[in-house]
Image: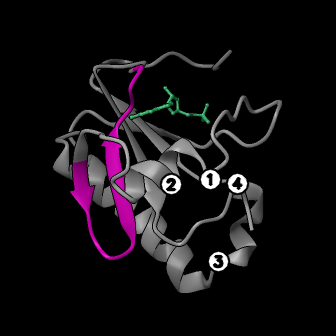
Amino acid sequence: MSDVTIFDKIINREIPAQIVYEDASVLAFRDIQPQAPTHVLVIPKKKVARFSQLADLSPQDVGQFFAGVAKVAAQLGLDKNGYRVVVNNGRDGQQTVEYLHAHILGGRSLTWPPG
Ligand code: 5GP
């Protein structure tokens, strides 16, 4: 069993977050340190720690996670101008919270490549 993270506490409503979307499969909330005008994190309710452990989820759960990301981005009004979905994985990927999460970044023209 993996360690309890800040995102476990958000999903269990033990600490507050600005929740923007929830369904049976995913929870989405605003990042506490936004890197773009819109910066929302989406987590699957069935937990894995990292993207590299995605195969531990069922194909259905993986699909619902990614479909949830797209749905949240659309609900945030980002479809017209576009947005970026980022998943940091492990040390070199600068992952700081060991609960799989997708960052949705939008609301401005983003630069490339990332640092
Ligand atoms: P990572 O670096 O693991 O890809 O992203 C973790 C993200 O979680 C960071 O962007 C960070 O700002 C965000 N974060 C860390 N702690 C909290 C918190 O308590 N609440 C919220 N809403 N976001 C957090």
- Mark 4 or 3: the one toward you: 4
Answer left or right for 29 relative to 100.
left
Check the image and report above or below for 96 versus 71: above
Choose the circle earlier in sequence order: 2 or 4: 4
Q: Which residues are magenta?
A: 20-33
**Residue at point 40%, 57% (across, down):** 11
Q: Is residue 84 above or below residue 71?
A: above
User: Mark 2 near mark 1, Cβ–Cβ under 8 Å?
Assistant: yes
Q: Amino acid at mark 2?
A: Asp
In the displayed structure image, the side of residue 23 where residue 55 appears, left or right: right
Q: Position of residue 54 (x, y in %)?
A: 69, 67
- In x, y percent, where is residue 33? 42, 20
Q: Which residue is mark 1?
A: 4
Q: Position of residue 35 (x, y in %)?
A: 43, 18
Label 1 is placed on what type of residue? Val
Please name the residue that numbered disc 4 is placed on: 3
